[in-house]
Amino acid sequence: MLPEVKHITEYPLYGKVLVGLLALTTFTILVPWLDLTAFTALIALVLASTKAGIVMTYFMHLKVEYILLKILVVMVLAIYASVILLTFSDYFFR
């Protein structure tokens, strides 16, 4: 973390993050019940990625880290996105 930046996250913010994560988890559970065929897995992956981003931002304190660490996380997410795109391109063209 940055030594010169003092960050104190307020408890109400953690409550809002909790409510958001619970809402996204509820959507993740409800998505398979909808008849979305091939998009069901895509929506579930997008919801899971969103939840992972929220956890990284608030609970792993990525919001107050050095820019280099943020760049590395973005690079990892780009690799993840390319693997997902390759997987779905294979899935859609079968």
Image (cartoon, grey):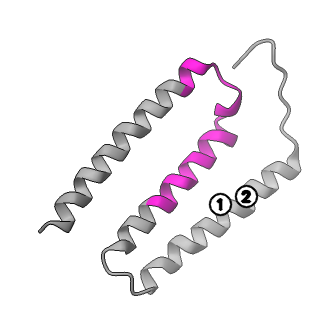
Whole-percent x, y for residue 41 in the image: 36, 69
Whole-percent x, y for residue 59 in the image: 67, 41
Where does label 1 land, which residue? 21
> Identity of the amino acid at label 2?
Leu
Whole-percent x, y for residue 87 in the image: 23, 55
Range of magenta residues: 46-70
The reply to whether discs 1 and 2 touch (Cβ–Cβ < 8 Å) is yes
Could you say which quadrant of the image residue 4 lies in? Answer: top right
Q: Secondary structure at mark 1?
A: helix
Answer above or below: position of 4 versus 27: above
Answer above or below: position of 3 versus 52: above
Answer above or below: position of 7 versus 19: above
Main SS of residues in magenta: helix
- Separation of marks 1 and 2 at Cα, in angstroms: 5 Å
> Identity of the amino acid at label 1?
Leu
Could you say which quadrant of the image residue 17 lies in? Answer: bottom right
Residue 30 falls within the magenta-colored stretch = no
Q: Residue at x 60, y 66 (%)?
A: 24
Where does label 2 land, which residue? 18
Name the one closer to the observer, 12 or 87.
87
